[in-house]
Amino acid sequence: MIAPQFRQLLTTLSLGLVITTVLPAGAQTCTAQGCKITDRPHEPYENKLQDYKSAALMWPDGAQDASDADDVVGFAGLSWSTSINHGLLRARQLNKPLFVFAEAKDCGYCQKFRNEILPQQTVTDYLTNNFVRARIFVGSADGKILQSRFKMDGWPTFLIFKQNGALVAQWGGCPDDLTGRSFVRKAKQYMETVTPHPAESASFPTPMTVGSVRRPTVERQVDFHRLWVFSSGVHKFDNDYLHPGCDAVVGEDLDMMTEFRRRGVPEDHIVFLRDDEATKSRCQAGLQQLISKAKPGDALFFFAHSHGGNGVICTYKEHQGWYYDDLIDQIERDFGGSQAFVFIAACHSGSFVDVLRKSQRRVAYFALTSAHPDRNAFTIATADFEACIADGVSGSPCPDLNRDGLITFEELARYTSHDQFTLFSSKPYYGWTDNFDENMVFSQSRKSSGGLQCDLCRTDSGYSGRILEQDSSRGVLLRPRKFPRSTIWVPKDQVNLLDD
């Protein structure tokens, strides 16, 4: 969605903060507390995108099974996951927190910890009995994301995460007087006090696939009669300060509003702005008018589609965008309800999740965005992203992954992510605050007709998409990935299922 002539502008405006903090492994200086990375020229933007290809920290490109040998290495007599994804999956399966050892290969203090501290029986026994372990190198994709997200500037760095991905503690260094006993003593202090960390307000954007404490029930379900809906969809721009003259023709927001009304959302609970209506001032005023009427226990459904940059989504005509900091502050300050479900379709929209995690929040948030903070979104993928959300609103059987008749927020996020990755190699980015129950039911689903319904496929004629229906005489009804508002019937013998 970015014209070539504006690529440099977008890189400067929306990626500057990330690029300056995400540096490749290499020249370092060592102090008594560890090794510190020195500044160096930035890599080309295209190379940076390639570096992040496997660094979204989310399914489906992470390990699918905690026993996957390719994601575990033996080191210092212990088993270590080689990615955050795999480590969190093992942590949830074993019901233990995740200990991360982040190091640089040529750091002398990292070598001291590896060779002198880690092999001590006191240390290995404590880590074995109390943690799942992951070993991450600063030059790896996960290492770069850890460095950027948690502002790590010294090595080694140690991090402890809850099973849901929330950070409990972070410390670093390997001073000369460090012993195995003192290391264990410090780790125990962190675990006993569970010191809050600014990033603990939001989970890592990884699906909670196993180990959920609370199962979904209809008692914990969104009440559409108490839902407040805000939608801002900008598809034709007058003066977009990031992408002037670039249109984004997507119509799934119209379908979602129709579904909300059908599900019982009152008309005065909906603010729907599109194109030239969606100026920044009108968006903020419309949201304010809506959320100020909410009462405790009410919920907000917030949807926005536009172009975007890191930390900002564009509005119509004006020379400034709607910054995510301002949006969250407005909800925190003026929303009378208790929960906010945020869906954003835009380039770099995942930065909303990163902004959300900056501090503790009064409102319980779930956020699902179409793109990683450091990635672009593309129109055809965005249209399908919004179609997946509409599937959840309408009660389609497809997002009901376990076929229990209930679509949870966690299922909707996994469903959307799998769809986007399989059809477009795109990686949505999502998370929720600690006070949000990801197993809350978004909607009840219609009963599946079975067979190939909901499977992803490619036809002999070159179409790919999701099967919505199956009929013995007509074949399968396909929603093409490039035209998600259209459907076509395809003979069953011309359909080839896509691998999961």
Image (spheres, rainbow, N blue to C red):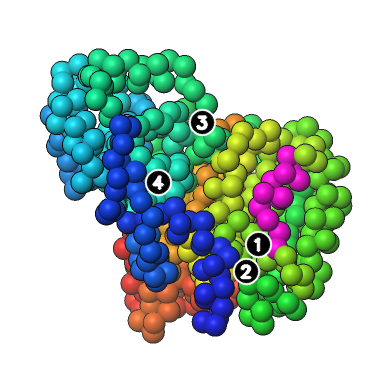
- Dot 1: element: strand
Question: Does residue 182 sit above or below 135 in this rendering?
Answer: above
Q: Which residue is mark 2?
A: 307
The mark lying in front, picked from 1 and 3, is: 3
Q: Which residue is mark 4?
A: 147
The span from disc 2 to disc 1 (Cα, nearest Å) is 6 Å
Question: Does residue 204 sit above or below 352 in this rendering?
Answer: above
Tell me the residue at 86%/50% (across/down).
Answer: 289
The span from disc 1 to disc 4 (Cα, nearest Å) is 25 Å
Q: Amino acid at mark 1?
A: Ile
Question: Does residue 186 sit above or below 234 in this rendering?
Answer: above
Which of the pair 107/268 is nearer the observer? 107
Point out the tag, 3 or 4, that comes first from the N-terminus: 4
Residue 454 placement (x, y as % from top left): 46, 60
Contact? badges 2 and 3 (CB < 8 Å): no
Q: Is residue 325 magenta?
A: yes
Q: Which residue is mark 1?
A: 313
Contact? badges 2 and 1 (CB < 8 Å): yes
